[in-house]
Image (cartoon, helix red, strand yellow):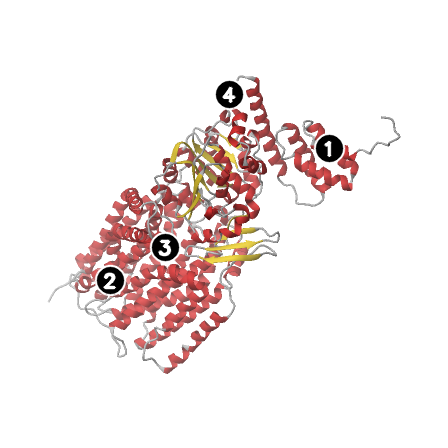
Amino acid sequence: MTTVPPFSIYLEITMIRNGFPFALMFLSGFAGLGYEIVWTRMLSASLGHEIIAVLAVVAAFFSGLALGSWMLDRPLSVAKKPGYWYAGMEIAIGLWALSLSFGFPWANRLAIDLMGIDPGPGRHWAVALLFPFILLLPATFAMGGTLPAMERLLSRLQGGGRTVGGLYAANTFGAVIGTLAATFWITPALGFQSTQLILAGLNFICAGGMFLDGMLTPNSPQRAVFAGPDQPESLRIHISLFATGLLGIGYEVLVVRALCQIFENTVYSFAGLLSVYLFGTAFGGAIYQAWSPKLGFRTVTGYLVQGLSLAVLAGLGMLLLVERIYAGVLEWIGRSMAGAIGGELCAAAVVLLPPTILMGMTFSHLAQAACGKEGGLGRALSINTVGAAIAPVLFGVVLLPAIGLKTGLVLVAVGYLMLVPIPAPRTQWMTCLVPAGLGGLFCFLPLSIPYIIPPPNGKVVDYREGVMASVSVVEDVNHYVHLKVNNHYQMGGTSSVYSDRRQAHIPLLLHPEPKKALFLGLGTGATFAAAADHPGLEAVAVELVPEVIDVLSHFESVTGHLTDHPRLRIEVADARRYVNTDKSAYDVIVADLFHPSRDGAGYLYTVEHFQAVKKRLAPGGVFCQWLPIYQLDLSVLNTIIRTYLAVFPDASAYLAHFSLTNPMIGLVGGGPLWSAKPNKFDRRVGEGALKERLKALQLRNVFEFLGCYLAGAEQLGQMAGAGPLNTDDRPVVMFEAPHFVYSEQGPASKRLITLIDSLAPIAADVLPTAEDPEGRDVHERLSKYWTARNRFLHAGVGVPRTGDVRELLSFVREPLLEVVRTSPDFDRAYRPLLAMAQSLVRIDPDAGKNLVEQLIDANPGRSEARRILSSLAPPLSPYSHP
């Protein structure tokens, strides 16, 4: 008979009562989900944000967990000291995380080389799935065995008992906190590498605790087996485990896609959704552990899956109200970071919590039943995880585009009903009619889950439910059509052609003779279409969302037939992956307005991405990155400018146009930039179609063209100041930009005015210093143009929207006349005043005449006002003397 030291017995009892094993599982779950978030985001930087890559990384992570659970199930079930096994797996996870924290840049470079520029579907899936699977396998394999090892240990310490629900709950509660901590605090403050080091430290802490326990614990007795008289064979349990994993993650995929059309879709949005999902399953596991039902296995299973079916249908019903819930919470708390995230969490909770609580209970019930004398929990975990790995592809790639959100959710509810055990009590079969009837009702009722909001008095013209996003085309009351992605991001339309075309022509004109151009981002195609105006120019556009290309026909009135143009080509690909794998050299690269707060967009503003773009430039090539001032604050803008200058130290900035509501600036690097002297500009433009297009866009001469110039590198650097750069390891923009969209946003005009007031363009920076009088005159005229431009923008701030010309003139008359006096080349103020004078003449001829005379005095070189004045003079009598 073995004598156990009294201290050892006391330590064992203390650890159990104080929840020591559960605390370790909490820390292990914290680290596990932290790793998943970090590794998934780091791999997306190389594999891309195409749905294939996103889903493949998740599937690879789950596959490693499943393989580890399956392979380790038998050894753990007979282990005499499972604490040692648990400690060894935590050490393995921590060591591999340490190696990945330093080896990820090399691994990402290898993934890019393996993928290539234009992989076929087979190669794309193979690399996107196998590469992360192999890269993460040492850690994910070990993760798959931690819960079975701890369950074996705790079952021994307690002398047998139900432990799965409690351990699963502790582990998943840790995952909730790990998700939130990694997303909201650790990674934003320290970056991905340091986050991995911290998480590895948690693994080592868990291992240290288990080593202490393992040394003091005697050999394990046999596990108590809980098998009721109505418990089915293991095959039936395994089928149910696979199906619940498949349906549970399938429900998550569909709900996330629905809520993406309401939420801001930032990195915090997805962390919030995931944490709510995990919290529900953890709470369900805890309820099951405390409940310890005494009913038969089949009875409990039947009630749980029927409850799941009803909860899924209830979630479908709540999706019809969730937009109001989100808006209500936002109004109650206020437009702020806390208010918006609180609204997203509440909206997610009403849809996700009821089903996920039942999911946690169901998994605990089935997994506990799968435990036998020779193991079983590892196999149960493995089978359940395999179903979870398949779900994103099945529901997100196959079913969602084919049958839509509503039918997909009804299918999930029906799937749960199919798991009611056979045979089952008659009362359970009768209660199945309730969810079955509700599911049929939802299928036939004309309920629309997509939240596509057309403009006032407008309509939805087209809607495509894609794998990555929902894409819609809406028409407003003026019959302009607009492109929207996930109902949240407006990507241009037929009313924004002026702005869209200028975004292409400005960088193209900064190159003396571009022959090949690359456009990162397509949208409506209006910017890309401008490339066709440049003779001999071949251009490629890269678009991430395939459905955007499918709806291009709605914008052909302003773009033409892009897909049939002989010199234009469209590629469906992730922009980052494309520039990293493409080996072509381009004279001009134009990056579209990527919304900085959108999840994943921050990677398009990193040092590593800008360096990859720089490698794609031909000698003398130009790269222009457009930035939406109306979608970011000055802090994020300065971070992007600092990052851009780190790669393009001679960069300059240009305004896309002179709009106060939707201001945009372009950072331009490469070159040296072409010197657009007046005569050279005229020769560059020529006399053909390009000249006519530029005339319509008010880019008729060198002053209108260079009038968009804001500042050079030195002034940009001074304005941006010191601070962190946006890198792949520490994507500052990804975590900071959402603060802007979540808070009360001031007018974009205020940020634009602050920007132009902090910069003072110098004519010699864009035109060579000239000693001749003509050169000095050009410099002086250009400087006056910039002064007039800035005064014009200042004059527009705070001007009310009114149809009363006299009221409008009371605000803008003197400021705009001063602008006209400042520069004869700047006509943005002259033309509005001329139009107001013509309107004023009809209602007050004397006042109108006075304004015309002031215009003549302000700019005597222009003839338009003189013609109006001559039309106001009374005609000479035929009898009067000359």
Q: CA distance from mark 4 to mark 2?
A: 76 Å
Mark 2 or mark 3, whichever is nearer to me: 2
Q: Can you tell which mark lies on residue 177? A: 3
CA neighbours of label 4 inside 10 A, class few (<14), some (14 to 19), many (20+): few
Residue 392: percent from left, percent from top: 36, 59
Is label 1 in a helix, a strand or a loop? helix
- Which numbered disc flags the more N-terminal residue, 1 or 3? 3
Q: Amino acid at mark 4?
A: Thr
- Which numbered disc flags the more N-terminal residue, 4 or 2? 2
Is label 2 in a helix, a strand or a loop? helix
Mark 4 or mark 1, whichever is nearer to me: 1
Q: Amino acid at mark 3?
A: Ile
Is label 3 in a helix, a strand or a loop? helix
Residue 303: percent from left, percent from top: 37, 74
Looking at the rendered image, the quarter that the C terminus falls into is top right
Q: Can you tell which mark lies on residue 769? A: 4
Q: Can you tell which mark lies on residue 867? A: 1
Judge from the rendering whether residue 857 lies leftward or rightward of residue 276; answer left or right. Answer: right
Mark 2 or mark 1, whichever is nearer to me: 1
Is label 4 in a helix, a strand or a loop? loop
Q: CA distance from mark 1 to mark 3?
A: 73 Å
Residue 396: percent from left, percent from top: 39, 59
Q: Quadrant of residue 217?
A: bottom left
Q: Which residue is mark 2?
A: 148
